[in-house]
Amino acid sequence: MDIDFKEYQLRCQLRGHEDDARGICICGDAGIATSSRDRTVRFWTLDGSQKRDYIMSRILLGHTSFVGPLAWVPPNEEFPEGGIVSGGMDTLVLVWNIATGEHVQLLKGHKLQVTGIALDGSDIISVSVDSTLRRWRGGQQVETLDAHQAAIQAIVKLPSGEFVTGSSDMTLKLWKGKSCVHTFAGHTDTVRGVAVMPNLGILSASHDGSIRLWALSGEHLMEMVGHTSIVYSVDAHASGLIVSGSEDCSAKIWKDGVCVQSIEHPGCVWDAKFLENGDIVTACSDGIVRIWTVDHDKIADAVERDSFATQLSEYKISRKRVGGLKLEDLPGLDSLKTPGNSDGQTKVVREGDNGVAYAWNMREQKWDKIGEVVDGPDDTTKRPLLDGIQYDHVFDVDIGDGEPIRKLPYNRSENPYDVADKWLLKENLPLSYREQIVEFILQNTGQKDFIPDPLFRDPYTGSSAYVPGASSRSPGVTKPSYKHIPKKGVLVFDVAQFDGILKKISEFNNGLQSDPEKQHLSLNEGDMSRWGAIVKILKDTSHYHSSGFSNIDVAMVLKLLKTWPVELLFPVVDVMRMIVLHPDGAATLLQYFKDEDAGIVIELIKKITASSPLPANLLTSLRAVTNMFKNGYFNEWLLLHRSEILDAFSSCGSSPNKNVQMAYATLILNYAVLLIEKKDEEGQSQVLSAALEMAEDETIDSDSRFRALVAIGSLMLEGLVKRVALDFDVLNIATTAKASKDAKIAEVGADIQLVAKQT
């Protein structure tokens, strides 16, 4: 179908998602599927009454974290109305029956977020941040490929049957079976999206802000540049048109390599797809899915168009900055009723959608209008500001000796000696600092080959050379100052209600004794006295350095963990939680882990976390494992079983029980500290994924969310997964956290933003 280019206009808005709309899947003539950060997949069908709008017909619930990639299964015997395959940050791939709205397969194997899905006949192909490509058949994993050297971000199937993947290693790869037949190199940052360009080759979208067209031979045919930020998605139509979605809040339409239209959105455009008729579907971070058309008969009515215009205007105002300040934060015209304090004092006020500068006229006692202040919509893409003036660089300089941090502005066109001299005078600092300041400027601006102008004369010494003064402590750039990261040391749960624990064990034991079928599981009087002795040792913390446990004591605890019914286990687990904090108790327990009871704790965790787990069991077992980080004895065991432990407890982050949330967040934080120390990149990636899943959920307990955010910041700052975190859209999570009313969460959100900006 050939389309002469016309301007696209709004056709309709699909409202329903409660958070960012992330992914789009065109489901033939059946409808449109969309995914979201709200953990749902929604299925939309054409409104038969007027053939313009779409209505939501299904909400698919099953993922435990945000959902991303989608694929359409055309109607067949198993799915008479078609099916959907979805992948999420929860590492799962789910297969849905549209007719029932239920998932019929749960595919578990990826270690990190699932980022792409494609179909190969009845097989499902999935890719992930864990760098693998996996093939699933009949609900079972049949093939795994370590396909890239970094996170895989996207996959598409070619008409010829091959697959193309895009990765954070900045390449695309063409796959025929298990073999990579070509690697496409050229992007300078993560390849985030891939698509088929009919009859030409492959399109790729990248964090470097560009879209590229490649021949299947590997030849780079074209580069399309126009976006001002990350390009998340790209798609092509049989007409030759291309659409791309970007962090810069626009969907751009391209024809013959030229951008012919840019459609502004009130938020980041995560995905953009063509319908068969040439209409465009976009998924936006405001949670709304929009359809755009060139068909005049399908254009939205005036009310809907005005509604969108208002959304866009309000969003721009909320983002617009003047003089480095948000427009919405500026005072109104009423503030001009307050006199100024000095002649020439300036004030910026909001007038409509603009910031306008005024200067105080002391003689006439009035504010004189200077003019409109112009600034970009997003300060993160602008040069830094100091005192309302833009510079190429603004550095923090620490003079030391209790002096405050000073701001040093610099433009690359300036002579660093001249800048240093003027700055030292302005700051009333000794000129003996001059050479160190110049060296600092040159080092931090990459001007290694700077050659001083031989005609330059120091205006203060009359010399062209540095004349040192008295020796003094040289200034240096401050390391970024973080409030809550990196986390040093581990956290434990070291408070116990021992009398209550003993009472509960005795109560449960009496119940077993009165049940003829379970009487053989009960403790005799001697055993109960041993429990009293164990608790006495644990209570006496002042003698932990000299007290000890007998093998009989520990063996009895482990026996109950293996034999007692699962609903009776939590007081026994609680005792184990405290034993691992006791030096001798931990050492004795570890011997059993290594010998005949090697798998007892893992089996216990699996038993406790099985279907419909008791909150008390979850809480005590989480706390017990968390306390194991206290003693280095257990480090090897914790590292060996890391994946099993985190997988088993993965649902605890969204538990309605705040204590369970806190215990899980603490487990994640302790793992982050240990894995940073061990420089375990794979482990850090898994913990990062779990922490991000908690941190993005604003409904969980604030203290739990705080610990998850600290884990993220620590892993980014001192771990090996900063790039993975950025690919996980950590900046969105940090921005949300920074806006929190909870001071701690806002501070750690700012910490994460600062880490993300450090090169």
Image (cartoon, grey):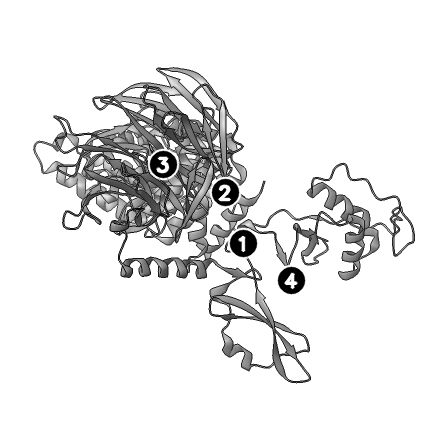
The local secondary structure at tag 3 comes to: helix
Q: Amino acid at mark 4?
A: Asp
**Which residue shows up at 44% across the image and 23% down it?**
215
How far across and how far down the image is residue 243, in percent? 39, 39
Alpha carbon of mark 4 to alpha carbon of mark 2: how far?
31 Å
Q: Quadrant of residue 80?
A: top left
Q: Earlier in the sequence, mark 3 or mark 2?
A: 2
Check contact, mark 1 vs mark 4: CB within 8 A: no
Task: Report the residue marked by disc 2.
Answer: 226
Alpha carbon of mark 3 to alpha carbon of mark 2: how far?
51 Å
Q: Residue furthest right?
A: 462
Q: Residues within 10 Å of mark 1 (few under 14, many from 20)?
A: some
How far across and how far down the image is residue 429, in percent? 79, 58
Pick the front one: 10 or 310: 10
Task: Report the residue marked by disc 3.
Answer: 625
Q: Which mark is residue 149?
A: none
Q: Which mark is residue 379?
A: 1
Q: Amino acid at mark 3?
A: Val
* Residue 580 in view in this figure: no
* Mark 3 vs mark 1: in front: 1
Q: Earlier in the sequence, mark 1 or mark 4?
A: 1
Task: Report the residue marked by disc 4.
Answer: 387
Q: Residues within 10 Å of mark 3 (few under 14, many from 20)?
A: many
